[in-house]
Image: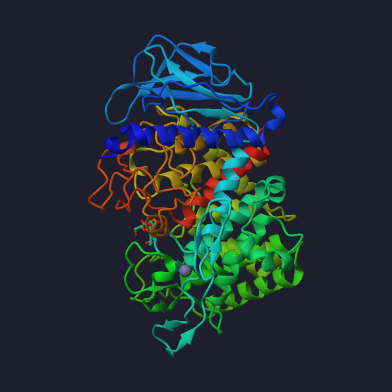
Amino acid sequence: MLKGKIHSSRWTGWMVVLALLAVLAVLYLTREDITSPPHLVNPQPATREIGINQAGYAPSAVKIAYTTTAVGEFSLVDLQANHAVFRGVPTISQKERNSGKPVYQMDFSSFQKPGVYQIQLSNGRGSAPFAISDHVYQSIYQTAMRSYELQRCGIALADTVSHVHHEACHLAPAQVIGGQGGERDVTGGWHDAGDYGKYTANAGMTTAQLLLAYELAPMTLKNTSLSLPQADEGERVAHAGEPDALAVIRVELDWMRKMQREDGAVHHSVKTAEFPGMILPEEDRQPQYLYPVSTPDTAIFAAAMARASRVYHSYDEPYAQMLLDASKKAWAFLEGSSELLVPESVQAYRIKSDKQSRVWAAAELYFATGDLRYRSYVEKNLGELELRPKKLTPSYWQHTSAMTIITLAMHQRTDWELTQQMRNLLIRHADQVVSRINQTAYGTVLQARDYDWASTKTSLGYGVHLAVAYQMEPKPAYLAAMSRQLDWVLGANPLAQSFVTGIGMFSPVHPHHRYSAASGILVPGLLVGGPNANANDNVAPQKQGAKSYVDDVRSFATNEYAIDYNAPLVVVAGFLHERRN
Ligand code: 9MR
Ligand code: ZN
């Protein structure tokens, strides 16, 4: 079915035009690199025989294309001049995990001239077009970051860049489940994923990672304009002087604050009882329910708010103080309720333990306040974290160890030996990740068991760890391993599939995303979950490792986007732009 769609000639024609336009947009950003307006000659028809990053590469990046076709030679063709600019011989890397077929690597890292290119095999087959440019990563960052603005709930959207538009949605107060009952205003924020629910834990983890992007790539996040939609001019004026990235994140923080109860505890989520059909957000008029408070949600909230208060401090002190107060209030609630509290009614994003997130909250609160109470909580409960470098996995709402370790490693407090211990742990972990990557056919960190929910997020999550390690010890191998994870997600994989909407010629056009499906307008910059060997949606092929993916709107297990998937994409693209030289 997928083949039928992609290979029908009209469709292919359109995709070529769209992909070339996207590549040209990158070139436009890099116009100081080129002397004449780009005029592209007709490329070879693009095939999925060649896996490549379909957005492209920074000039100095490691650049490797992959194929399972045995050919004697490959060439890199300049699509503006229409001639080969580089030739090489594919070398066998490893056997592909599932098919056992050898995978050939085509390394053209030494070629660094900006432009638009295609890889061609000596059998005449061509890859998707891609750019070599100093602005590739910035453009990916920009598209991924501004997608959050297009996920906004509770306002009418009219974005002139993407043409995403809809009426204001989900404005009615939510009905409180349990407790005193009643109603509460919890409007605003971002829709969580392809559905219209909003969940505290996922919001907390996402905002925390986006704020980490700000700490790791401050120049990129401060200086990259996001051309935010005009509709929000009022808000923009109110926060004038604040970087666009922080204005975007603020929207979710403001919603999260509404989820906090007077006693400091935080509600789990607001959503309808059942997922709506594939309708526009303003058409979703089922009652919204405010799900009960829980201790894991409260702990993640406390951590994210304390982290945010640090970052917003230099722009808006009263706001930072408000965030810190919310965090302290959540912590006070946790102190008074040491047992795990997760009510029965909570289903999606159900968290099994709050122990790790309490440590994370204490760590963030320590750096936000300097109060030794929090520091001693961290020291006493350090054993809750995953401290074995080999076992450390990327943070997500269920397991927050990595985020805590990163926080502890990045912020220096005098006389705390823990800082160095955490740095050593991350460096050892990063070295192991690099050696894992060098042993796989496509340079991915993913191992068989990782082809589960949101494998794309997992891959980029390791990229985040490599970024932090690089910050501490700038080994080129960390940067190379990181950019190869981005390459994998953008098409350097066995399906030659980019997993980000609007980026790359073979990218998702039928994501499981209610707004896109109902409006027919594809929201750009959304990272879908990608290969999931255990996909339970009856559409995606199971047990096929990296090939367990289908670009089908029904495939919620491989082709849905969620706010937390995009966060490591923002960190990795932002960091690569920051450190590209
Ligand atoms: O991202 C979530 C993933 O880690 C879980 O394994 C999966 C199954 O429980 O759910 C994913 O989250 C979905 C959430 O439950 C509802 N909104 C859409 C989310 C993305 O698919
Ligand atoms: Zn909404």
How many numbered marks appear? 0
For residue 137, above or below residue 169: above
Point 62% across, 30% down: residue: 133
Give the x, y percent position of residue 388: 48, 46
**Left or right of 564: which side holds 409?**
right
- In this view of the protein, can residue 364 be seen by the observer? no
Nearer to me, 531 or 451: 531
Nearer to me, 340 or 114: 114
**Left or right of 479: which side holds 563?**
left
Point 67% across, 71% down: residue: 324
Q: Quadrant of residue 279?
A: bottom left
* Quadrant for the N terminus in the image: top left
Q: Quadrant of residue 3?
A: top left
Give the x, y percent position of residue 545: 31, 38
Ligand 1 is found in which quarter of the picture? bottom left
Point 32% across, 42% down: residue: 549
Give the x, y percent position of residue 118: 49, 22
Q: Quadrant of residue 548?
A: top left
- Residue at far top of view: 72
- Residue at far left of view: 538
Point 67% across, 56% down: residue: 244
For residue 421, above or below residue 493: below
- In this view of the protein, can residue 313 be seen by the observer? yes
For residue 447, above or below residue 374: above
Give the x, y percent position of residue 213: 62, 50
